Image (cartoon, rainbow, N blue to C red):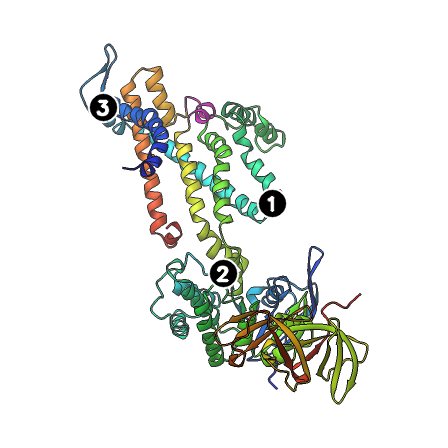
Amino acid sequence: MNVRRLAPWLLVAAPLAVFVALFLAPLVNLFALSLFRFDRSVGVVGGLTVENYTKFLGDPFYLGILWRTLRIGVLATLASLLLGYPLAYHMQRCRPRARAYLALLVLAPLLVSVVVRSFGWLVILGPNGLVNSLLVSSGIVRDPLRLLYTEGAIVVGLTHVFLSFMVLSIAAALARIDPALLRAAQNLGATERQTFFRVVLPLSLPGVAAGSLIVFTLSSSAFITPALLGGPRVKVMSYLSYQQTLLLSDWPYGAAIAFVLLGLVAGAVLVYLRVLESGRYGVVFR
Amino acid sequence: MPPVLVELREVAKAYEGHAAVRGLSLAVEAGERLALLGPSGCGKTTTLNMIAGFLEPDTGSIVIGGRPMAGIPPHRRDTAMVFQSYALFPHLSVFDNLAFGLRMRRVARAEIATRVREALELVQMAGLERRYPRELSGGQQQRVALARALVIRPGVLLLDEPLSNLDAKLRQEMRLEIVEIQRRLGITTVFVTHDQEEALSIADRIAVMSEGRIEQIDGPIGIYHEPRTEFVARFIGDGNFLPGQVAGVEDGQTRVDTAAGLPVRAARGRQRPGDAVVAMVRPEKTRVTLRPERLENSFTATVRAITFLGPVTRYQLLLRDMAFAASLPDASHLAGVEPGATVHVGWRAADCLLLDPAVPPA
């Protein structure tokens, strides 16, 4: 084989090696670990078994945490979509300068450490926090509401950060739409509203899809934000896996939990994409 | 005379202080094909966009079918446009692209199917209903774009540089087809182009535009043979331009002393003695010979270059240090003439037009 044809492979060799060594190999290792048994007195015991998986899938407590995790992922995605689409749409219609400022604003949460950001929400959502003191002082409620350590708090905290991914991917999709298409729609008799629903929205679906996938996968696997805003009482899968692995030293079970989450998120993503691609406007994904 | 369908009265439009269209008035007759022709930046596309309603004029008014259009949004105007980029909806099939305008008009489902089929047959695209725009060639996309505009049966068809994205051969074919379809439907058509050949071959009348104004509006023959200004003459076809001053008017002819020092005789013009003018003769109206001929204008010239172009042979001459072009359909009498040779060039006074200078001399 001559050097010219080999060169691209040589160039990707380094990143490929990193990917295999630091991601693929541990993943395979982790999967193998999830098939081992754990004994409190002995530790990890060899011999392949699916016991960890049957234990998880047969226990309503664990399944409840799984559904909660997916529910939080879906809610954070929906919230980001509903808040993010109008913002992205507006950004596209702005002048370049205003657009740059808005993009900066949208990205701002990413510039702050996740811990600092979450503590900010603790201050806002706490029993004596901003929201509750406003509600109590205005007489809407008599006693402070329990806002912190709820699923809602986790969804708010996750939406706050991941909104930026949603906005940026939708804005990118909107920017690719030829402005002549909007004129064409109006010229053919469509009102602005009809133009939006029949032309803009379908053509922005790839951005909606990309943004949703990013927000959903990141939200479902987030660890610090749910741990700080949900606490130990509102556990999610990542926290459960952490607890089993590091606090209880049951590495095989922690690994199995991680793989159940991975499998379900990957499955949900595949189903979501399949639905979009086989839908009415599937052609925009090709 | 057919009634006027589209009328622009003293329409002006400026973008950020730059005047794109300045006090333009225009009447498009029902059923005619009118071309807005001009270089880029002359305001022709702005004018088209104002007719479609994408832009509102700053001043002046637009009337379509007797209705003033002020404040009427594009979707409530009786116009349909074919865009330069075609602007086909990439997420919709050919059928749905055509059905779009009909659905907006709440046409019944059965009628939509019939009308879409008829429109596709009209542009010879029947059978491609299920294709998506990206699966079509440029020429096919062009036809679909035309069909999508025609299927809603608009009062006015607007074409924005409709053929600029096609290759030369396809362009000629589509020119003929657009004219045929327009004739069959009798639809009033306004189209924008910077291509003089396109305007000459498609339009009934051509409005030559420059700097936001109409320089001249006339049929293709009038625009070519009787341009009124130097701008129009330079924009349409080739010409030899001899700036000078009117020396006198006699025997139905005008004598012009050109800046190059040539006494030129031209057809009678509006100009009076002392006026600055540009005398213009088209290359194909000149004669190049070995001996002087009996023509009102006859001069000696030096051959710079000879180019055989097939239908004509082009002679680049030097006439008193001035470049001068002559196109001869038959150059057999000049066999053996090489660059550097001295020849005689002449033209009839009747073929020499007097134009207003493009920029008045300071």
At x 60% / y 84%, what residue is drawn? B2
At x 57% / y 23%, what residue is drawn? A128
User: Do marks 3 and 2 share a subunit?
Assistant: no
Disc 3 is placed on an element classified as loop
Relative placement, left or right, of B116 versus B5 is left
The chain to which mark 1 is attached is A
Report which residue position mark 2 lands on.
Answer: B85
Report which residue position mark 1 lands on.
Answer: A96
Residue B79 in picture, x, y percent from top left? 55, 70
At x 48% / y 65%, what residue is drawn? B104
The chain to which mark 2 is attached is B
Tell me how far mark 3 sits from mark 2, CA to CA. 59 Å
Q: Are marks 3 and 2 in contact (CB under 8 Å)?
A: no
Residue B315 in picture, x, y percent from top left? 57, 73
- Foreground: disc 1 or disc 2: 2
- The label on residue B61 is none
Residue B101 in picture, x, y percent from top left? 47, 66
Quarter of the rendering occupied by the N terminus of chain A: top left
Disc 2 is placed on an element classified as loop
Report which residue position mark 3 lands on.
Answer: A35
